[in-house]
Amino acid sequence: MVKVHILFEFRKVPWGGGNQFLKALRNYFVTNKVYAENPQDADVILFNSHQCISEVIEAKLNYPEKIFIHRIDGPIRLYNQTNDRRDNIVFTANRYLAEATVFQSVWSQQQNHLLGLQRNLFETIIPNAPEPSIFNRNGKLDFSDNRKIRLIATSWSQNWNKGFDTYQWLDENLDFNKYEMVFVGKSPIQFKNIRHISSLSSVGIADKLKQSDIFIFASPIEACSNSLLEALHCGLPAVGPDQSSTPELIGRGGETFTAPSQIPDLLGKITNHYSEYQASINNPPIEQVGGRYYNFISEVYH
């Protein structure tokens, strides 16, 4: 069996989508007895985006015979400043350190190549998936239109470009006699009508998702949002921007918008056909995602 090590600084607390997904992927590898706890015992080393690159270089120098596979994010400069150097780090690391590349969405692959990422001999597209023991439909609140419709959004970044113009519009314009909304995470906005919960564990987030009806996702530029996937895996139809990878993830399990003013009508559409939207959520679980990673790793290794 090919052994895999993920070279990444894992954090126990919720710390962005990459951390959450890679913990779930590591758990999959451990469960299937193909994970190596250190690079020395691994056949293949998986590294992530621009992170821990000095450690990756050191491992490459120490173990030149091992296969290195690069999971790529972004392009980061599309949602941050145009002079953000992290994409250059990613492109250089991918060219000189990686035998293969994993993209998280079709959109991410296309945009990275358009911005100058050289093609690798081995490339694949594999979406993310959340930890299934936490983000699932167990205990999901039954939908009812005999009460206020419960909306929820989550974000661990207070970067304004993560869609806070949309959240602000909703706070000022949504009919709060019909809807109630919770925002979990960091926000640069002092909400007037939306209830703000600053921090929750993954279990706490899952519990809040399961007590909600529809997920509001506003970030316009995402390679493959874990926040969105967590909500979908908990059985929430979603509304999100018709941009970047979001339409790939939502599929028929929700609706997309080009302006915040369209959201109320889309919420009404989902509310009127809730069971159909919920039944159309079709995102692969970590068992499938992890299997695709391992099959790709084995293909590159052999």
Image (cartoon, helix red, strand yellow):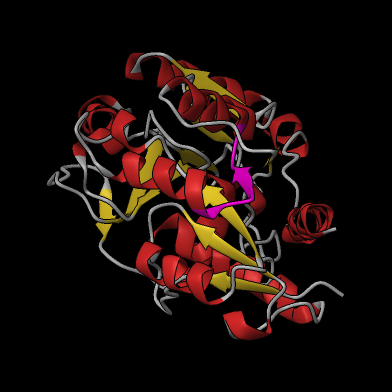
User: In the image, is residue 103 part of the stretch drawn in magenta?
Assistant: yes
Location of the C terminus by quadrant is bottom right
| 87 relative to 112, above or below | below
- At which x and y percent is residue 286? 72, 59
Q: Quadrant of residue 88?
A: top left
Query: Which stretch is magenta?
Result: 97-105
| 220 relative to 33, above or below | above
Residue at 21% across, 32% down: 168
Q: Say whether residue 252 is left or right of residue 225.
A: right
Foreground of the two, 171 or 158: 158
| 169 relative to 215, above or below | above
- At which x and y percent is residue 266? 51, 20
Residue at 46% across, 67% down: 56
Q: Say whether residue 273 is left or right of residue 98.
A: right
Location of the N terminus by quadrant is bottom right
User: In the image, is residue 41 part of the stretch drawn in magenta?
Assistant: no
| Residue 148 visible (yes or no) | no
- At which x and y percent is residue 29? 73, 73
Residue at 69% across, 26% down: 273
